[in-house]
Amino acid sequence: MRPRDPSQPHRAASSLELFFDLVFVVSVSIASAQLHHALSHADFLHGITSYAMVFFAIWWAWMNFTWFATSFDTDDWLYRVTTIVQMGGVLVLAAGLPAAFEHGDFTVPVLGYIVMRVAMIAQWLRATRGAGELRTATRRYAFGIAGVQVLWVLFLLIPAGPAQIAAFIVCALIEVGVPVFAEHRRQTPWHPHHITERYGLFTLIVLGESLLASANAIIDASHELESFAPLISISVLTLVVTASLWWVYFWPPHHRAITTFARSLRYGYIHYFVFAAAAAFSAGIEVELDVLTGKSHLSSVVASFTVTIPIALFLLGVWWIAIRENADAVVNTVVPVGAGLVLLDPVLPIPVAITALVMVVIVVVLVLRPPVTRESTNQGA
């Protein structure tokens, strides 16, 4: 297991990586469904904090494997088996998500998370043998990850409540600090096109989850409403917004965003909000449908915010990490202003039409003004 060539031509995601991503469809779907139930019952604080916590585990486990694979993927039998063990950990984590949301019981999710992380430790230790001058970094990864897992076990001893949330924040900050600790002197190699392709594929997963969950909710609601007009409006909104989010995400050349270690950290970490927002969008659509069918007593304004906040967060996140440095002044004005208009949408008289219109305008501007080619976009943090 030796470091991969970061300039290898035509490097693409492997079939194992695509297979690995499939188990995250399950965990993202369950997390989104639990968020929907919490929001629909006006349990905002608990629902959002629980979603933020469980999605961190999903995102961080996926991201760690992705960056390891871009550096050391060997695709032999041992690497495959270790990866499949990580997939098993994801499924265990997914099985425990309902209890985490409903009772604050994170026992099963943490156990599944630890399974994933122990497998990741084994990968880093194996990489150490052939890492050469990168041996210090690989060892730091292995021991850093191992140390945090001890903290997650202690986390289980803390009862649900503010103390549990505070402990989670501490453990999460230490987790995201491990790569900084491991690579601050010498960085493991990453393949820019490969790594950004992997992020793009996960974005397609969460956007696809939004389409699937929304379609299922619309089908269920069609049996309870006499008029199809509201369902048609929400269906159009879902398709237009999801397609627009896809268009916005894949407009800039993402590989330019990870030319330095600092920029790669920014790119990877801000994606937590991008992925979480995309998955939360479907929960918002389902909340809107609950209001229409009388299953939720939320006001229409509050329900609309459950849709518009994820959209705006997604737009701002992608703009910050990938669009901003590859766009001219017009695009750099339209995208953030568009995100602001989407946020204001619930208090306007025709919210569905405004949201769809804003997203279409953003896409039209992106079509008319392609990414700017600048040498300077590859410099700086």
Image (tube, rainbow, N blue to C red):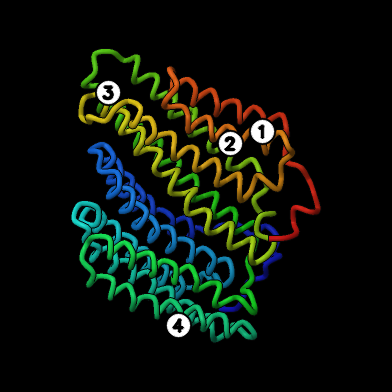
Name the image quarter holding residue 58: bottom left
In the drawing, what numbered circle is on residue 247? 2
Amino acid tagged 1: Leu
How far separated are the C-alphas under marks 2 and 4? 40 Å
| Residue at 40% in and 20% down | 233
Q: In terms of sequence position, does the residue under pointer 1 or pointer 4 come before the other?
A: 4
In the drawing, what numbered circle is on residue 143? 4
Amino acid tagged 4: Phe
Camera-nearest label, 2 or 4: 4
> Picture coordinates of residue 49 (x, y %)?
33, 53
Q: Secondary structure at mark 4?
A: helix
> Picture coordinates of residue 343 (x, y %)?
47, 33
Q: In terms of sequence position, does the residue under pointer 2 or pointer 1 come before the other?
A: 2
189 w.r.t. 96: above or below = below
Residue occupying the far right of the picture: 375
In the drawing, what numbered circle is on residue 292? 3
How far separated are the C-alphas under marks 2 and 1? 9 Å
In the drawing, what numbered circle is on residue 366? 1
Q: Nearer the viewer, residue 332 or 18?
A: 332
Q: Secondary structure at mark 3?
A: helix
In the drawing, what numbered circle is on residue 18? none
| Residue at 57% in and 80% down | 137
How far separated are the C-alphas under marks 3 and 1? 34 Å
Check whether the beta carbons of the residues at disc 2 and disc 1 lie within 8 A of each other: yes
How far separated are the C-alphas under marks 3 and 2? 29 Å
Q: Secondary structure at mark 2?
A: helix
At label 1, counting other C-alpha atoms closer than 10 Å, the crowd grade (few under 14, some 14-19, many 20 or more) is many
Amino acid tagged 3: Leu
> Picture coordinates of residue 322 (x, y %)?
63, 48
| Residue at 20% in and 29% down | 295
Q: In terms of sequence position, does the residue under pointer 3 or pointer 2 come before the other?
A: 2
